[in-house]
Image: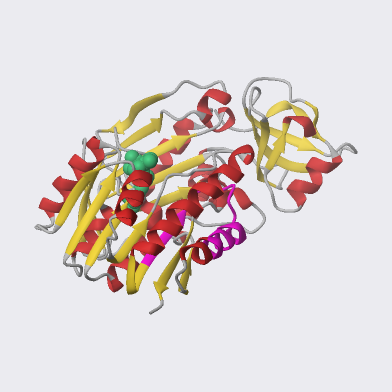
Amino acid sequence: MSGTHDGAAVVSARGARRWLGGHPWIFKSDVVRAPQGPAGAVRATDPNGRPLGVALWSPTSEISLRFVSTRPDVALDDAWWRARIGAAIARRAGILDARTNACRLVHGEGDGLPSLVVDRFDRWLVVQLLSAGLETFRAPIVAALADLTGAEGILARNDVSVRGREGLSRDVETLAGAVPETVEVLEHGVRYLAAPHSGQKTGAFLDQREARALVGAVARGRALDLFSYHGSFALHLAARAEQVRAVDSSAAALARAAENAALNGRTNIECVEADAFDFLRDEERAGARYETVVLDPPAFAKNRASIAGALRGYRDINRRAMRLLAPGGFLYTASCSYHVGKDAFLAMLADAAAESGRRMILRAITGQPADHPEVLTIPETGYLKGALLEAGE
Ligand code: SAH
């Protein structure tokens, strides 16, 4: 289960430079000699035989190797996994406190644990093992997590498409103890039910926790939560706004939003099942006005080829949302498309503002919370960006 197997990989000079420059991925085209043997941990060298360290090897993936250490002699034994996972958990000290009981414990490459995601929801964990190389270490990973967190149950949400590209099965499986259908999450004074087995991602979108508090603090009047999912922004808006409309195309998500509103004793949240694009267009035509608007769409750019189309989509909804704002109103807008970078996002917002005919003041630029660490040399660890905008008079 542990250690490296024989038959070291040889990585091209370009691949070696990439790793030495701080990026752990080696693509298939940069593997000069593939490791002998099945998925697992392998040693790798550059073309001159200089040791580069130890990597996770995925035989069928486009990302063949994911480096985990520069030390060629390191053994990925139980103690190694425990130490690396322990360091990730220690990095979250101070996040799990009286204000929240849910956070991401392991953010893959951001924590030096490529292709591993672990989210904590109160006393339970949800994990994703997203590469063939990592999958071979499932047992020590689960043992370390159970031991370090004392979790009552660990669920694998391995039902994601990237597993297919790794030649792995796609399933949802309990790995330890038992995990309930819903877990009550406390988040800055708001409570909502996460759904580890069936919800989107690992059951809730933890990456917007701080943004929800930010916009919640300035919310007032008539408020709109577009792409609301189970209403987590709406719940924060409802504490200060008079009336909140949560809009989503998923009836199941809105049913949970209504349940969450009741859980918080909120009677000022109205759930609207609609396509957000159509909803915005209709509201704009009707001349509607809102004091607070949240736009948190799914990733429109799934790959490089779809960036231009995605930017048009973002510009369209942002322009319309800006036009709906009452003078002095706030718009919190986000993009979780990795392929749309921070600069492109802000440029898109500037275009949308120009087209909207409104003067939009940039009050805050937001990124990922500390439990989703972004590494400067690994751009893929950063995907979420947002802006809090205020409409001028
Ligand atoms: N704001 C949420 C997360 C949103 S995830 C939170 O903080 O928890 C994106 C949501 O957009 C999903 O719930 C999905 O059902 C919804 N969605 C996707 N396409 C949509 C569309 N065209 N119109 C309305 N909702 C859409």
Residue 34 pos. (x, y %): 76, 25
Quarter of the image where one finds residue 225:
bottom left
> 376 above or below 303?
below
Magenta stretch: includes residue 350: yes
Q: Give whichever of 376, 237 is nearer the camera.
A: 237
Rendered image quadrant of residue 187: bottom left
User: In what quadrant of the picture does the N terminus appear?
Assistant: top right
Q: Residue at x 73, y 26 (%)?
A: 6
Front one among 79 and 171 = 171
Q: Residue at x 33, y 34 (%)?
A: 155
Answer with left or right where residue 129 lies relative to residue 51.
left
Q: Is residue 383 left or right of residue 249?
A: right
Q: Is residue 132 above or below residue 282?
A: above
In this view, 150 is above or below 40: below
Residue toward you, 362 or 175: 362
Q: Which residues are magenta?
A: 331-351
**Does any portion of residue 202 appear in the rendered image?**
no
Query: Looking at the figure, which quarter contains the C terminus?
Result: bottom left
Foreground: 240 or 150? 240
Q: Is residue 387 above or below residue 143?
A: below
Residue found 40% across the figure and 73% down from its top: 390
Q: Position of residue 98 (x, y in %)?
A: 25, 65
- Asked whether residue 40 is in view, the answer is yes
- Whether residue 167 is in magenta: the answer is no
